[in-house]
Amino acid sequence: MNIGKLEAAIEAILFTMGDSVELSRLAAAVEHDEETTRRLIHNMMDRYEAEDRGIRIIELDNSFQMCTKAECYEAVVRVAAQPKKPVLTDVLLETLSIVAYKQPVTRLEVEQIRGVKSDHAINRLIEYNLVEEVGRLDAPGRPLLFGTTEEFLRCFGVQSLDELPVMRPEQVEDFKAEAEEEVQLRLDI
């Protein structure tokens, strides 16, 4: 197959699947090694950007997905029904942060960090497809373990969890101090 036909096959696969497709599956489909397939896809990504197309290919944790360019969203909305966008409250963002940084994590571990029940928050994050069950802890009761999804990566514009911001130790100390002050204020009331 020549390069044009290989790229056409990759484009057809990504368009048809809708969701992300692992590099290994794409490479097997076009009967090439992963490195060659990755180069082909990155060339396609560069060309889509250079030609200012309405679609783009994004990379998510060693997988690729075709999606609409953000700049074209308004035009798409005029034709399609506006999708319902999940609202991430402070509680949901706090819970999501804990799952993202501590994963895989149990519901109990999230509750211990937050200091309150987190059933509703975790269930809502699962409903929004930002968090999913990733297994069970090998402990009494075999509690569920939770982790983030590819949708989480897409929503927050990162290719992998390695790109999440890292907190400086002094920030952690500031947060601890604030939390301790808040606890003391509640005790004084």
Image (tube, rainbow, N blue to C red):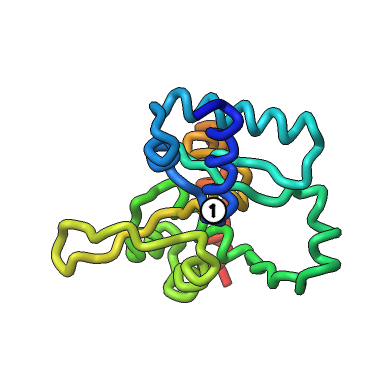
Report crowding for label 1: few under 14, some 14 to 19, many 20 or more residues within 10 A (C-alpha): many
Q: Name the residue at 28% across, 64% down.
A: 144
Q: Is residue 16 visible?
A: yes
Instruction: Find the residue positioned furthest to the left.
Output: 140
130 or 167, which is in the foreground? 130
Image coords of residue 105 (percent x, y) = 34, 55
Secondary structure beneath label 1: helix
19 or 13, which is in the foreground? 13
Image coords of residue 87 (percent x, y) = 66, 68
Q: Examine the image and state in which quarter residue 73 appears.
A: bottom right
Which residue was labeled with disc 1?
152
Q: Name the residue at 61% across, 47% down.
A: 66
Q: Name the residue at 54% across, 26% down.
A: 2
27 or 4, which is in the foreground? 4
Q: Name the residue at 48% across, 75% down.
A: 120
Image coords of residue 112 (percent x, y) = 37, 61
Looking at the rendering, in which quadrant would you find the C terminus? bottom right
114 or 11, which is in the foreground? 11
Q: Along the horizontal axis of the image, is 100 left or right of 4?
A: left
Q: Is residue 4 above or below residue 179?
A: above
Instruction: Find the residue positioned furthest to the front.
Output: 1
